[in-house]
Image: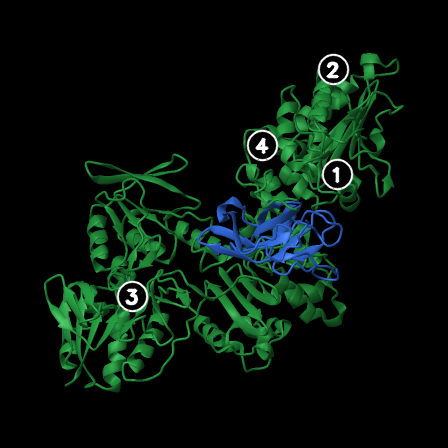
Chain colours: A blue, B green
Amino acid sequence: MNANIKTWIEVGCLEDIPRNGARCVKNGEMTIAVFRTARDEVFALEDKCPHKKGPLSQGIVHDNCVTCPLHNWVISLRSGSAQGADEGHTQAFPVKLEGNVVFIDLSFSKTTG
Amino acid sequence: MTKKLIVIGNGMAPGRMLEKLVEADASAYDITIFNAEPRVNYNRLMLSPVLSGEKTYRDIITHDDAWYASHGITLQKGEKITSVDRDAKTVTSAGGITASYDKLVIATGSSPFIIPVEGHELEGVLVYRDLDDVDAMLSAAKSGGRAVVIGGGLLGLEAAAGLKEQGMDVTVLHLMPTLMERQLDEASGHLLEKAFKDRGVDVLTKANTKRILGSSGRVTGVELEDGVIIDAAIVVMAVGIRPSTQLAKAAGLDVKRGIVVADDMRTSDPDIFALGECVEHNGHCYGLVAPLYDMATVISQNLLDGSALYEGSVTATKLKVTGIDLYSAGDFAQGEGREEIVLRDATAGVYKRLVLQENRIVGAVLYGETSDGPWFFDLLKKGKDVSEMRDTLIFGQAFQGGTPLDPSAAVAALPDDAEICGCNGICKSTITSAITSKGLTTLEEVRTHTKASASCGSCTGLVEQLMAATLGAAYSPAAITPVCGCTDLGHDEVRRLILAKELKSIPQVMQELEWKTSCGCAKCRPALNYYLVCDWPEEYADDYQSRYINERVHANIQKDGTYSVVPRMWGGMTSSAELRAIADVVDKYDIPSVKCTGGQRIDMLGVKKEDLPLIWEDLGKVGFVSGHAYAKGLRTVKTCVGTDWCRFGTQDSTGFGIRLEKFMWGSWTPAKLKLAVSGCPRNCSEATCKDIGIICVDSGFEIHFGGAAGLEIQGTQVLGTLPTEDETLEHVVALTQMYREQGRYLERIYKWADRIGYEEIRRQIMEDADKRKHYFDRFVASQKVAQVDPWSERVSGKDKHEFNPMKTLEMEAAE
């Protein structure tokens, strides 16, 4: 029916992502932002702020949040939920690190068919 | 007949296991230990004190020959077991001894990981694992020279400190940006690095070893990826360990990273246990002693038909380097539902951070003062609810139980001769009597009259508490708006302290100024980055991850995530070649919109991020550089055509505008800075609503500043009039530098001037020639590093990661 990718997909190395920064992974129509924190934790969110679809990958990463570059919404990297008084949610994807290799699980991604 | 127990390996874990076993039932087994090392059991944790000379081998023996003899244990020293026959239930050693067992414990430990770089087999390349290694290091240290330690983890740092203590020059190479990154967060990693540097150990982070150099079979140095070569008499590899599993694997046991055991510590063969660093339990391999002791206890019970279960361990780490106190335990990453408590005491060099989840401690990092480490670790292991003592938790165990401390009560209780301000030697009574006798009510007044907290400012809090205690309700502290929620300090205070304490990196600022979060937020980080760029232009390494996206990728993000590109058109002048290049780029990259800006330039909107470097490359061929239309920095200098063409023009306004722009481009300022030069008072370039404007008149140049025509509308004020271009340029530049040094981040020049006072600015720039000259010189100095075209840098490959996706996944074709 459509491309429904299951299980872990390798997307690159930890070192490919700057600390307190992000890189993008293109998955068809969807862009996924892969973040690396100061503590070398890795998270993946759909690259769209729940507010006005701003590219979260371009925001400033601090603690385990990213501040959207368009209107400064703060989004939790772990859950994808807006913090503080703002309400909204962006899709978060499971991530794992094996050594320094980053894998994302896209099986829950909404297919764009 | 008594059952036979054979133990392979005689490290600390089997030592503990045997202790427990004979304590419970000394006659249950006939015990034989095979040990590859020709020694009795010693405490490997104490290798570092042996290396540094604080202890000897004798001091660290845990079980001597007499202990084995008195418990009837046979110790086969120097007998390495080479095979296990599980069917016959026997083991055989390299020396040909075969012995049978009823139960077998494999405790083969781990071996150091050797990076297989060229030269790793040279003589003088050592590891740091057992006494033989320590002996090798000690004898190498006798002949002096430089030791290079590869690996800035626990072992590597202990080795480095020990070798330094033995009189060698030492360089630590660490692949990651901060030391001990697995146990420490960034802030404490930096403190640790500083402590090592302070004791004369060179530390290179992000250092990737390319190869080890040698001559006639002996090591002579290390070459890094970036070509740097470091001389070395010895090289110590301390990059990690891996479980020693060859024997178990050959015996057909289930082995992954380590020898796999179930919760009862049995391997895939129920008569064989595995213990210690060779074990993999639940996916974890452990290298610290506490978990190994936990395992030892479980095995000792199960050997006696018990049913004890090992449930995994949370681990704590302590660095054993004299004079450096460091403790870390648990998981201190941040996350959903997690809160942190941070205590920083800059004067004492203390950093403590607790991570809580559901009112329970899940992680702790202590630096500088670690006496509460075991207490926190105990709370962590027990999962104790800490909500009752949360407010004072970080102060440690000694603070619990009593009434909560009121900080101002503590200050009030200080004796009169207690020193409050260390810089100026001001004691408590000096301050309180000045407050009462002179009727002082503000911090500034106290500073003026007593000098307390007027230098470095770190005692400001104490002085304020003292004022509150002395004045009672009459004291209302000036409402300082903090930079953000991460600190109570305002922008001015932070800027002053950065200079006074010579703070030169963001982690250093956060530590010394006692930031309340571990790595700041999107408000304070860009501000700190600007202050450091401005104050230490030649020393500070710009932190791009603390810049807003526009400054990070040198273009302006638009609402749909595309970018706009504005090349610099000096003074608003352009040419057919430039316009042709723009037209070509617009066609080639299918750019949807092209617009003239208010700053006399051309804006290309809707550019895809990936295309940015390609577009810059094309634009660069005709000489275009970045217009910094995205920067908190110098933007445009708008001009009119002046005496070149205009019948009213009084001076060469275009030429002077271009000269100003060429002098000032690339400089970062607190907020954007726009200039204009008008050739006559008709003011066609609208200089009187710019940040800095110049109106040319017959007699020279009238400098204006502090205009606004955005959210607010405000006409400029006149700074003064100068007869020549050269003098005008010097004054404009000095004004800009004064603003750069005093403005709060994101504060436009008119806001700054409203706050400081126009008169004060005129006094410093127009009347005080020395001051003006100093401002000018500092601006010129910072321009030396600032005037690099960011576009051409990125065309040549800088920050490539910013512009390309990390990966594009191949989708199966959709139906």
Callout 4: residue from which chain?
Answer: B
Q: 10 Å neighbourhood of mark 4: few (<14), some, or many (≥20)?
A: many
Horizontal relation, residue B3 to residue A113: left or right: left
Out of B608 and B51, give the one closest to the viewer.
B608
**CA distance separating discs 2 and 1:** 42 Å
Mark found first going from the N terminus, 3 or 2: 3
Identify the residue at horizontal 60%, vertical 67% (top origin). B339
Element marked by disc 3 = loop
**Badge 2 density bin: few <14, some 14–19, many ≥20, Cα 10 Å:** few
Closer to the observer: label 2 or label 1?
A: 2
Disc nearer the start of the sequence (4/1): 1
Which residue was labeled with disc 3?
B253
Viewer-nearest of discs 3 and 2:
3
In the rendered image, residues at marks 3 and 1 fall on the same chain:
yes
Chain letter of mark 3 equals B
Q: Position of residue B467 (x, y in %)?
A: 68, 66
Query: Which numbered marker is on residue B794?
Result: 4
Q: Nearer the viewer, mark 4 or mark 1?
A: 4
Q: Mark 1 lies on which chain?
A: B
Q: Which of B467 and B277 is in front in this view?
A: B277
Assign a secondary structure to mark 2. Answer: helix
Of B427 and B582, nearer the camera is: B582
| Residue type of the residue flagged with mark 3 | Leu
Amino acid type at circle 4 is Arg
Residue holding disc 1:
B761
Q: Which mark is residue B28?
A: none
Q: Are marks 3 and 4 in contact (CB under 8 Å)?
A: no
Can marks 4 and 2 be said to lie on one chain? Answer: yes
Label located before the other in sequence (3 or 1) = 3
